Image (cartoon, helix red, strand yellow):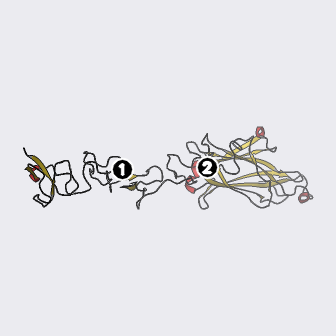
Amino acid sequence: MTTTYYEDFDDDGFGDPDLAWSTEACSLPPEGSSQNGADYVEDNQDCNDENPDVFPGAEELCDGQDNNCNTDVDENCPCTPIDGTEECGSDVGMCVKGIRTCTAEGWSECGGDAYVPAAETEICNMQDDDCDGETDEELADDSWDTFSANDTCETASALPDILEGGETLEVSGLSLYHGSLEGKDADWFHVEALEASHIFACMDHLFEEQCNFLFLVTFTPPTPEMKDDYVMCVHDTTFARDCDEINNTFCTSDADAQTWNEEDGVHEMVLAWSGTCGLDDSWNFFVEIKNAEGADNTCMPYDLSFDMGWTGEVGDQCQ
């Protein structure tokens, strides 16, 4: 009775199952007696007789081959196929997807020339830097506006008084923004426009009418293109911080308002009033900044400035 012996070309102890490389013999043929000068063996379970690292029971390597001849390729490997690539990362917000490569140790880090990863923190730039689908979220409120601090007339932030003919008051780094994203912000400020001297300048014109006290408010939006996203309203009131005694309200959104200065990229609003020589003609104002209808809050900063002057002389006849 004969036995079928199989050529073991790669000398790993397992033969090629192809009968073309087998032989029938009563006993194991001598070493090196196969057609290719290889040994014969009885086991024909080698699935690749040209690779000594591939045989039943061999260690499965992450190399794109079935090393242990169990019909599975790279089983239990961290990824497959080796040297294969795939997209990685995100394409949400500012992120751009990259490429990663499969290695025997697992996937490589995401990379590539076009790859833009998510930023660790969001910054105020009207973009989704951390690629989570939200823009400018959870940033700090501006220093004038802790949550709900100056959202109403009653909680308006007090600004320094403005002196007639004095220096301009500049207020910068403001924003219509709440980091919690809970509701829209609005900013209210109170300022008093003070007459410089209501007695000594009027000694010769006591109780005569004074003209042309001017209160100038300048609003600078984050960008000129955003000028229509904001509404600035100036409210005048006789008594300091009295929200129930507002006399007049003037807004940049009024139909007849002509406040936009195209050259300087600012809204300018001038309020004028007359006075009486010898009396204190100072006046109180509330300045309200809010979003135009349909516009969203943004952390982008805006600026305000305040100035008080008058163009008439004491005793001038008011026109």
Residue 157 vs 111, above or below: the answer is above
Going by the numbered disc 1, the residue's amino acid type is Cys
Instruction: State which quarter of the image contains the C terminus.
Output: bottom right
Q: Quadrant of residue 180?
A: top right
Q: Which mark is residue 270?
A: none
Label 1 crowd bin: few (<14), some (14–19), many (20+), radius 10 Å: some
Could one spot residue 219 in this view of the protein?
A: no
| Image position, residue 54 (x, y; %) | 25, 53
Looking at the image, which is closer to me, 158 or 261? Answer: 158
Looking at the image, which is closer to me, 185 or 178? Answer: 178
| Mark 2 element type | loop
Q: In this view, does 30 lie to the left or right of 270?
A: left
| Image position, residue 83 (x, y; %) | 33, 57
The residue under label 1 is: 79
Looking at the image, which is closer to me, 220 or 193? Answer: 220
The residue that appears at 23% across and 55% down in the rendered structure is: 12
